[in-house]
Every structure is written in structure tokens, then in C-alpha cells.
Image (cartoon, helix red, strand yellow):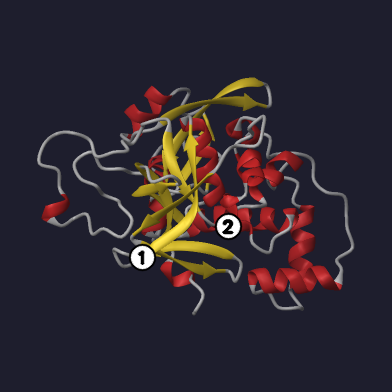
Amino acid sequence: MEFFEALEELVVASNSYQETTSEEIDKWGKLFGYSASETPDIIASFRADLNRRRLTKDQWNLFKDSNDAIGHDQETYEHQLQLWSTKSKTSNRPRACDDQAFFIFKLGAPFPDIQSLQSAVGISATLRKGLGEEGDADFAHVTGAAKRAIEDWIETQSPRPPRPTFIRLSQSRKDLSDMSCHPSLGVESSLPQHRLQDSRCHAPAQMEYPVWYLFYGTLMDPQTVQKCISLPSTPRLVPASTRGGILRSWGRKYKALVDGPANAQVDGFAYLVETAEHEEYLRFRETEAYEVVRCRINLEGGEEVPGLTFRFVKQEDLDVD
């Protein structure tokens, strides 16, 4: 299933009326901080919104194992997506992490193609092919900073053109430098001794495939990896380890890899990711709570290879040891 094809199918018919249960009131209150008195009205209003975005079953199956879906069912996660969207529209001071997030929207008026978007707003964007309600469709893939520039541009136009419908993609950041080892697990790569002395790219390069990944936590399960990237058979994971990091926990459920002493060892399994598409699915699964960083992977048998892993970035969310 193409991820961007699924995203365009978010707008579907609304739910029929459902009686709000005490269990639902309690769950929504814990997830969103609503009081018991206001929660039933919020749920009723949410369910009655004919224009709200909803996930198909396949989309929910893709999202439900991600870290930002902890504690959610499909309906509450749809509400969480709605809150993120509303916050992005109303916030006057976007956070830096919002600028670094990723979004897509379907191309059309006022931007029929990528060239017109880039010419009008002066931002960079990537063309994505997908499936819309009327067949094949083109999408623009932009950063949060570019999204904000588009919204600001629309506000200055008269008459004001239609505002694109943005869909936030919670994806691990991958920004590998070709001038240094940055970012690398357990390494302060801004220091002079870690800068390259020639123009060679530090391995692995940004778009180098196949590429070894060191998995830990739930990704050590081959069936989880198979489901995540839609493989036809169970993948082969190789016992492996890396140094320079330690494992913490967050949400009392998930493992979080953070920088540690140079000799600290993390055990896991290595997997050779064959394509950019497979890597993209993995980055969506891990969400923007993580970033892709370089590391040295020691495979079973003694071979050491350059590779990548997911480092946790939301330090404030870590559980207290």
C-alpha cells in the first residue's frame, strides 16, 4: 500500500450517532486533559463534524503501532490529528520542531504544480505521486517552515485563494551531513576532529541504499518489521550491537536510544534496508520523536559495518529512572 495514496482517502462519511460511555469519557479525559463534565459534549461535537478527517482501517493499522499513538484507539487518534491541525492554524509562534515536521497537500488551486508553488512562495517542495478521490493525483511534500510560508502567502493575496488541506506526517528526521559524521550516536560531531579532511561523504550517505540499520525495542521482532514495510516474507535480522548509546524508556512501554559513554554497548538486531521507500515506512513508524543517526554496527561473527539507527530526541518525555 502506498502511504500517500492512503492519506488522500482521509475524508469519508461521518460516524452514525453513538452514545458516549463512561469508559470513553474517562479515556478522553486522560488522553486530552478534558474534565468529566465537558468531555461528552466534546465527543458529541467531534462525531457530528461532517468535515472532519477520518482514517481508513488500513491507515489506522499503519499508525496504531507508532509511538505517538500510545494509549489511543482509532477515534481518539483521529481527534489527536484534529488537535494538531487546529494548533498549527492558530499558533502565532510555531515551535522549532513544528518547522522541522513534514506535511503533504494535494496540488491544485492556487498551486497546480510544484513549479508554481516554488515560484509564488519561494520555498522548496518535493513532488509525490498518489491516488486522490478522482484518480491519480500529485502532492507537494513540504517542511513545517514551508507550510507556514504558504499560509502566510495566502493571507497576503486578494482575493484570498483557497487554503490547501495539509496533512502532518510524523516522520523521523534524516539529515546526514556530507561534510562531517554528523549526526552520529554518542559523538559530538561539531568538534574539529570529527570533520572530514577531504570531500568524501561520510558513510552511510544520505541516499545510500542498501543500508544497515541497528534495531532495538519492538523492531527486533521480524514480524513487526515485515508488517511495517509490507515485505512478502519474514525478514532476516542479524544479532548485532553498537557503541556510544544507552537505552532509556518512555511511556513506560517503549525503548529510547540516547547518547551514552563511548564504551557503552547496545545490543539489538541489524537489518539491511534495501530501498528509500522501505526506509520511509520505518521513519513513519518511529515518528518525529526519533531521528536517524549514524553508528558503527558490529554484526554477529565480528564484521563491523557503517550503519544507521534511531536516536530519541524528545529528552523531556523520558521516564524517570
The one of 193 and 164 positioned closer to us in this rendering: 193
**Where is residue 287 shown, x and y percent of the image?**
52, 51
The one of 97 and 86 positioned closer to us in this rendering: 97
The one of 50 and 158 positioned closer to us in this rendering: 50
Which of the two labelled residues, at mark 1 and mark 2, occupies the earlier sequence position?
A: 2
Q: Which residue is mark 2?
A: 67
Residue beneath the point at 64% across and 74% down? 33
Q: Which residue is mark 1?
A: 264
Q: For the view shown, which residue lies furthest in the front direction?
A: 301
* Circle 2: residue type: Asn
Q: Is residue 168 left or right of residue 151?
A: right
Q: Residues within 10 Å of mark 1 (few under 14, many from 20)?
A: some
Residue beneath the point at 74% across and 70% down? 27
**What number of labels is visible?**
2
* Circle 1: residue type: Ala
**Quadrant in which residue 156 is drawn:** top left
